[in-house]
Amino acid sequence: MYSVNPKPASRIGSQHSAHARLLPDRADVVIAIMCVAIGLANTFWSRHNGLLTGLPIGAAAVGGLVGALVALRRTFPCAVAIVVSLAHLLTFTPTAFAVMMYTLGNLYRRHRAVLAAVMAAGTSIHITTIMVNVSEPEARSIFYTLAFVVGPVALGAAAGLRRDLTESLRNEAEHLQKEQQLTAEHACSAERARIAREMHDVVSHRVSHIVLSAGALEVTAQQNPELVVEQARRIRTYGQQALSDLRDILGLLHAARRSDTAPRAPQPTLHDLPALIESARKSGQVPILLNLPDEEELDALPDAQQRAVYRVVQESLTNALKHAPGAPIAISIVLTRYNITIDVINEAPQRIAYTEVPGSGKGLLGLTERVRLLGGVFAADHLTDGGFRTHTVIPTAIASSSQCRG
């Protein structure tokens, strides 16, 4: 038995494409038919047919063959041009000759030396043909040379350059469209990251308070009934606040889909820090020391810096309450002309957590990215005494403007 190995699909496809390149297109076929018709008509209409004058059948055969070869002008341009030029010396075939001059000008439009050589060779061949057909060449021979050699070469080169320019503009438009698409995707990714940070900062803080309060409630349920009622009230309050924050964020998402100019929910500022500290103090039942600059200095900070400071303090408190329950916390915010520095330090945990609060591990990473976008630096590390410290430095508007001027 003999086995026949089928040809790979890629090889078959390449063969089909090669055959397709060898076949002339419809435009070339139409041009070839026109050249054949004009060549045959010129053979019987003109009294001079070059070296084949007096041999109308031979001149007609050469004219028809030359016209048919024009169909292959894109497949074998140099070979067809040479054959047409030699035939132009034998018998007067100006149409096919002009078409091949146009083809060579279009093909070698970017090569000036080749274009000059084509013009020189075409001019020599055409003048020789005129001298063979006309006993006394006149001044109009120069016009014929321009019409059948220089003009077609120049038109072919111009058409090719125009096509190159159109293709270049099309590619540039596609490139710009891709860049715009990438920019839009990057903007969407940045917006999703911002919303994710907001959701983490808000929901994680509220839910951590709920879990901690629930743990305290479980421990003190049988010891202090009054504390049970207070802790239950706090859980309800924190749950309501978490739901409200989620509604605000989800409302922002729906509004952003409807309109890019939709108003956003109110964002926290440094004036909301005392309420945040008081909520954390009650939830964790820990002493929290807060050192803030004057209100006038805080009001001078841009909104972006105020939100970043608030989120840094919020996430630092959440981590302290989760990982160091009962440990005192010290918060220091120092504002200078060039930057604002935030230090949040908690001592070593004084008791075991009532309930372990799961964490995503993305809170500190989110703070690092948030601060980095404002040109600042965020660092978090353990202290030798078992405590924990977050240190943040964010440039102020004064510092940013002075750097721009420099």
Image (spheres, rainbow, N blue to C red):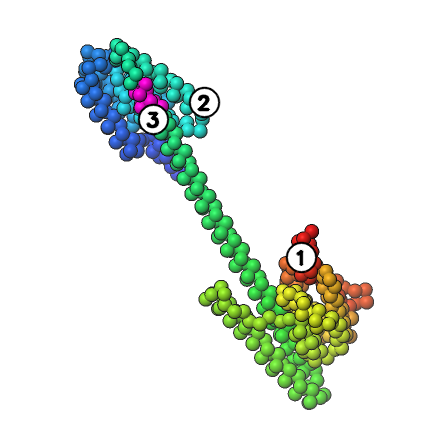
**The one of 306 and 6 positioned closer to us in this rendering:** 306
- What's the magenta region? 142-151
- The question of residue 149 being in magenta is answered with yes
Distance of label 2 from label 1 (alpha carbons)? 57 Å
As drawn, which residue projects farthest toward the front?
Answer: 139
Asked if 278 appears above or below 69 in the picture, the reply is below
Other-residue count near label 3 (Cα within 10 Å), few / some / many at <14 / 14–19 / ≥20: many
The circle on residue 152 is 3
Residue beneath disc 2: 113
Numbered circles on residues, count: 3
Q: Kindly report which numbered mark, 2 or 1, lies closer to the viewer in this rendering.
A: 1
Other-residue count near label 2 (Cα within 10 Å), few / some / many at <14 / 14–19 / ≥20: few
Amino acid beneath label 3: Pro
Tell me the SS state at disc 2: helix
Residue beneath disc 1: 401
Residue 181 position within the rendered picture, expressed as x and y whole percent measured from the top left = 48, 52
Instruction: Identify the residue at image location x=41%, y=27%.
Output: 108
Residue 138 position within the rendered picture, expressed as x and y whole percent measured from the top left = 28, 14
Is residue 123 visible to the viewer in this orientation of the structure?
A: yes
Tell me the SS state at disc 1: helix
Which mark sits nearer the N-terminus, 2 or 1? 2
Tell me the SS state at disc 3: helix
Amino acid beneath label 2: Ala
Where is residue 366, by image quadrant? bottom right
**The one of 359 and 319 positioned closer to us in this rendering:** 319
Residue 34 left/right relative to 120: left
Other-residue count near label 1 (Cα within 10 Å), few / some / many at <14 / 14–19 / ≥20: few
The answer to whether marks 3 and 2 mark residues whose Cβ atoms lie closer than 8 Å is: no
As drawn, which residue projects farthest toward the top?
Answer: 135
Amino acid beneath label 1: Ser
